[in-house]
Amino acid sequence: MSGYKMHGVYAPIATPFTDALGPIAYDKLEKNMAFWTASDMEGIVVMGSNGEVVMLDFEEKKEIISKVCAMAKGKKYVMAGCGCENTRDTIKLCEHAAKAGSQAALLINPNYYKNAMNDAVNSNFYTTVADNSPIPVVLYNMPGNTGVNLSAAFIAKMAQHKNIIGVKDSGGNIVQIAEILRDVPEDFAVFAGSSSFLLATLVLGGVGGTLALANIFPNECAKIQTLFDAGKLKEAATLQKKLLASNNAVTARWGIAGLKAAMELRGLEGGAPRSPMLPLKDEDRAILKGILDAVTQGA
Amino acid sequence: MSGYKMHGVYAPIATPFTDALGPIAYDKLEKNMAFWTASDMEGIVVMGSNGEVVMLDFEEKKEIISKVCAMAKGKKYVMAGCGCENTRDTIKLCEHAAKAGSQAALLINPNYYKNAMNDAVNSNFYTTVADNSPIPVVLYNMPGNTGVNLSAAFIAKMAQHKNIIGVKDSGGNIVQIAEILRDVPEDFAVFAGSSSFLLATLVLGGVGGTLALANIFPNECAKIQTLFDAGKLKEAATLQKKLLASNNAVTARWGIAGLKAAMELRGLEGGAPRSPMLPLKDEDRAILKGILDAVTQGA
Amino acid sequence: MSGYKMHGVYAPIATPFTDALGPIAYDKLEKNMAFWTASDMEGIVVMGSNGEVVMLDFEEKKEIISKVCAMAKGKKYVMAGCGCENTRDTIKLCEHAAKAGSQAALLINPNYYKNAMNDAVNSNFYTTVADNSPIPVVLYNMPGNTGVNLSAAFIAKMAQHKNIIGVKDSGGNIVQIAEILRDVPEDFAVFAGSSSFLLATLVLGGVGGTLALANIFPNECAKIQTLFDAGKLKEAATLQKKLLASNNAVTARWGIAGLKAAMELRGLEGGAPRSPMLPLKDEDRAILKGILDAVTQGA
Amino acid sequence: MSGYKMHGVYAPIATPFTDALGPIAYDKLEKNMAFWTASDMEGIVVMGSNGEVVMLDFEEKKEIISKVCAMAKGKKYVMAGCGCENTRDTIKLCEHAAKAGSQAALLINPNYYKNAMNDAVNSNFYTTVADNSPIPVVLYNMPGNTGVNLSAAFIAKMAQHKNIIGVKDSGGNIVQIAEILRDVPEDFAVFAGSSSFLLATLVLGGVGGTLALANIFPNECAKIQTLFDAGKLKEAATLQKKLLASNNAVTARWGIAGLKAAMELRGLEGGAPRSPMLPLKDEDRAILKGILDAVTQGA
C-alpha cells in the first residue's frame, strides 16, 4: 500500500444504530456500504465526526473499523478516524486500523483541554503518533467541533514528517487553505472538509475532499472535481452552488440528525443518532425533503 | 445516604500517572488522598476535568472511582464524574459509581457536537440519566472546555427533577450564578466551579465549591467559606484576593500541567499529565513557586 | 473640585430625541433630570453607551454635556463620556467637559480597529489624554460593545497615573474585578458597570456603579449599596436578585430600545432611539411591563 | 453615470496625516493618488476602513471625499465610504458624495450596539439610506471590525432594492460568498474584501474586489483578475498564493500601521496612523521589507 495517494472524494460515513440507546446496526451499515462502494467516490472515512466517533467506546471503534475495511476491500480506500484525546489510545487504534486494512489514519487533534492545546502539545501528539503508526496519518482540522484551529504554519511544519501525508481542513477558511497549499510539499495532500468549499480548494491546488454530503450525493460531489479537472470551471461553480443548501442541511444547520434523515429520504439506512442527540423533527424533515428534491430535480 | 447534602469545599482531584504514556499510579494517588482526607474540605470529586477524565478509558474510569471511594470511605464524601458523550455509557458509569459508594454523580454535558447541543438535547441527556441513576446527579457547566453554556433558565428547569440536586458552575459568569440562585428551589445546591468566584457565589446564596485550587490549598479554600459563615466578610474578601494568582496558575494560565507542578511544589505527588499534554516548563515552574510562596508566606 | 471622589450609584442617562431622525429633545431631558437629581444616586453619566453617544455628532455631544452639567449643578456629580476613536478629539471633549463643569471624564477605549488595540496603543490613548485633560479621567471597559477587553494588569498599570482615578468595568467578569481590586491603589475607584454585579463588586472592595437600571430604579440600585454598607448582606443579596430581570431587560435583552420603553412605563420621557435602532415592539413592551411591575409590586 | 458598473480591483486608500495628532496631509495624498490613478485598477475607495474613516470627524470626511473625487476625475471611479452609526448622518454624507462626484456610496453597517443590530435594524438602515441616496449604495460586510456579520440571506434580500448595487464582503467566509452569489440577481456585484480570497470569489461569480493590498500592489492584484478572465487559472492561483503574505502583513498581522509602513517601503507617502494607533516598530518594518521584496523580486 506504499503507493497509496490521497485523491478525490471520500464520504465520512454515518454509523447506524438499532436505536438511540442501542448497539451499531451492521445490517444497515452493509446496505449503505453497497451504495457507497458502487459510487464514483474514491474512498470512505470510517469514524469521522459524522460517524458519531465520540459516541462509540473503544471496542466499538475497533469493530466498526474492521468491518468497514472488510466491506470496502478491493472497492474503495478506507481512511480510519483514530484520533483519541490521548496519545497512547490513538496509537493503539492506528495499529488496529493498519491490521484491519485501512490505508491511512485520520487524526483529529485532542481538544477537551482547549487552553492547553498549543503548537507544542499538538506537535507532541502528531509526531508521536506518526512515529508509531504503521499506516500514514492525515491531520484533521475541525475547529467548529474542537474549538482549536490548527494553523497553516503548524500544518506546514507537520507536513515535513514522512508519515504525515495530508490534511483534511474542515475550518473552511479559504485563506488558511491557500496558505497551507503555498507552504506544504507538492506531494502533501490537502482535502476540503466540506463540499461547500471543495471547488475553491481545488482551484488553489487541493486534491479532493472528505465530504458529509457524499454520504447521500457521492456522484454529484465527485462531479465537481471531474468538471474542474476537465477545465469546465463554470459548470463546476454552478454545481458547487447547487449543492450548497443540501450540504448546509446535513452539516451546520441540522448536523448528524439532518444527515441521517437525508439518508432515509434518499433510500439509505439512517435511523436515530445515539442519545442524547435527537432525530430530526418532522417539520424540519419536510423542509429537508424540499432541499434534497431541488438537487435531484433541478438538473 | 439519603441524607447527603452538597455543601462546602470539594477538590476535583488530579490523577497521577507512572509517566506520560503509562497507567495510573495508585501509590501516588494514595499518598495524595491521605493529605486530602485529613484536610478541612468536605468532599472529593474523582474524574472531574482536573482528573484528566477524558484521558482515561472506560475501564480506568471505573477502577479509579472504586479506589477513591474506598480510600475516602468514612472520611470525605465522593462525587464521581460520570458524564460521557453518550447517554448509555453515562448511565453505566453512574451505576458503577453508586455501587462503589459515591454520594453523587457529576455530569458534564456532552459537547463534541456543539451545534447539536441545544436545550432539548441537553434535557434529554440529563433527564434520562437522572431517571436511571441510582445516586443523585449534579449538573456540571464548564463552557471553557465544552464550548457550550448551560443557561440559568435550563439549569432552573433541570432543578425541578428530584434526582438532580445541584450544579457546579465553572463558567464564572456571576450574573448567571445570581439568576440560577434566584430561580432554583431552596434545597438545590449551587457550587462555584473555581475558587476565584467562591466568595461572590456564597454571597448570592451558593453553598460551596469544587475548586482545582483545593488540591493544594484545601484549608485555605475552606477558610473563605468559614469566614463568610462567621460574618467576617472583609477577611473573606482579603483571602479570596490573596488566592487569585495561585488559582489562576493552576487553571486558566497553566491548566493541569500547572496543577501537577504545584502539587509537587507543595509536597504532593504530581507527575506528568498524560500525553500529549506536556509538563510545565522549568522557567514557568520557577514563576509558579513564587506565586505559591506568596500565599503561604504572605499571611 | 480636587475633593471629588467616585462613590455610589450613577445613572448613564438616556438621550431623548424628538423622533428617530430628529434632534435631541432637551425639554424631555429636563423632565428626566428632575427625577434623577431628586433621587438617592450620587451622580449622572452623560454620554455613556446608554446615552447613544456614538449616535451624536461632535457638536451635539458638546451641547448635551453643557446642558446636563447646568441642570445637575449643586445636585449631582456629572461624569462626561468623552472617549472618541482618536486621541485629539477625546482631549478636546475633555477640555469642553471641564469647562462645562463635569467632575470627571469617562473614557471608553477606541475600538473599531480591534486587532490594533493592544496594550501599547491603549496605553498611548489613556496616558496622552490623562496628561492633557483638565479633569480626572475614568477608564471604561465595555467588551460587549467594543470587542476589546482591558485586562486587570492593564488597568492596574493605568491606575498609577495620577489623573486616572477609577474604572467602570462593564465586562462583568468577577474574577477580573477581583484582580483589579487586588492590584490598584486604595484610592483608585472601581465601579460595577451593571447593577447585576454591583453587590459582588462591593463585596470585593468596589465603591459604586454606573448602572443603566438606575435610569428607572435609582433608589432601588442605591439601596443595594446602603444595605451592604449597613452589613445587611442577606437583604442586599435579595434585592440584587430581585432587580436582575429588569436590569437584563434594559441591557442585554433589549438594549436601549428596552431602556427607553422602560422609562416610558415608569413615567419618564423615553421616545425612539435614533435610527437605525428601532423602538421596542408592542409584544415585548407588554413583557417588559410585567418585569417592571414585579419589582415595584413585589416589595 | 447611470451606466456605472462595479467591476475590477479597487484600492481602499490610506489617509496620510501630517503627524499622529495632526490634520490630513493633502500634499502626500496627491502624490499617492498619482500612483493609483496611473495603475491598472478600475477604482478607488475613499473613507474605507483602511482610510481610518472612524478617526476623522464629519467635516474632514466631507473634505477628503471632495478632494479625492476631484483628483480621480476622468481617471478612476470613486466609491465613498459614507456609513455612519446613525441613518441621518449617513444620508447627509451620501448626498455630499454624490455632489462631489462619487459613483457609489460604500456603507458599513452601524456596529457599536452589536446586540441591537439584528436584520430588522440593518434593513431599516440600508433601506432608508438607499431610498434617500442620490447615488447607488454598496453593502460593506466587515465582521472582523464590526463584530456583526451580514448574512447571505440578508444580503440577498437587500439586493432586491434597486439602489443597492453590490456588496463588498470582507468576512472571507467563502461559503457565505457562494451563497450570496447563488441568491442575488445577475447584475448585483459581489466584491471580495481582501486580495487573499479574490480568486476564490471570482471563480464563484464575483466581479472584483476592494483590496487593501492594492494600495501598494494595484497591478499585481488586477492581474489575478486578468489571468482568471483569460482562463489562466493556474497562473492566477500561483499569483494569488504569492501575494498572501504581503496581504496578511497589511491587514490581519499589522493592520493600518503595516499598510502605511508598506507604502513608505514602496515609495509612497505613508506616515503615522492617527493617535492612538502607533506606527510599525522598526523590527517589524524589517520583516515587512522582506515580505514585500519576495513579491517584487520573486517574479
Image: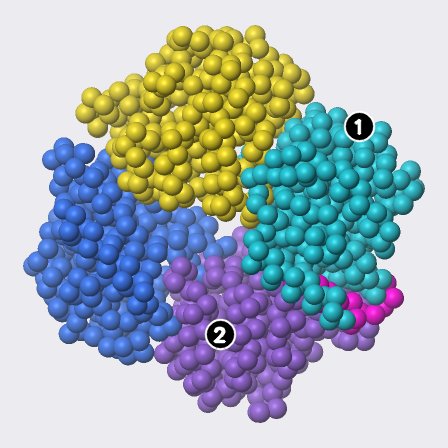
Chain colours: A yellow, B cyan, C purple, D blue
Q: Position of residue C279 (x, y in %)?
A: 50, 58
Secondary structure under the numbered disc 2 in the rendered image: strand
Q: Residue at 37% of width from left, 36% of height from top?
A: A159
Relative side of D179 to B281, left or right: left
Horizontal and vertical percent position of residue A89 = 59, 29
Label 2 neighbour load within 10 Å: few <14, some 14-19, many 20+: many
Q: Tag 2: residue type?
A: Leu
Q: Nearer the viewer, residue C49 or A87?
A: A87
Q: In which quarter of the image is residue C183?
A: bottom right
Q: Give the range drawn in magenta.
A: B229-245
Q: Disc 2: which chain?
A: C
Q: In this view, does B205 lie to the left or right of A276?
A: right
**Up/down of A249 relative to D248, above or below:** above
Point 49% across, 26% down: residue = A133
Image quadrant holding the C terminus of chain C, namely bottom right
Q: The N terminus of chain C is located in which quarter? A: bottom right
Mark closer to the observer (1, 2): 1
Residue tagged by mark 1?
A: B95
Task: Examine the rendering and report whether any part of residue D99 can be seen.
Answer: no
Establish whether labels 1 and 2 are both on one chain: no
x and y, in percent, of residue C112 in the image: 39, 62
Q: Quadrant of residue D109?
A: bottom left
The answer to if B230 sits in the magenta stretch is: yes
What label does residue C107 carry, if any?
2
Q: Is residue A272 magenta?
A: no
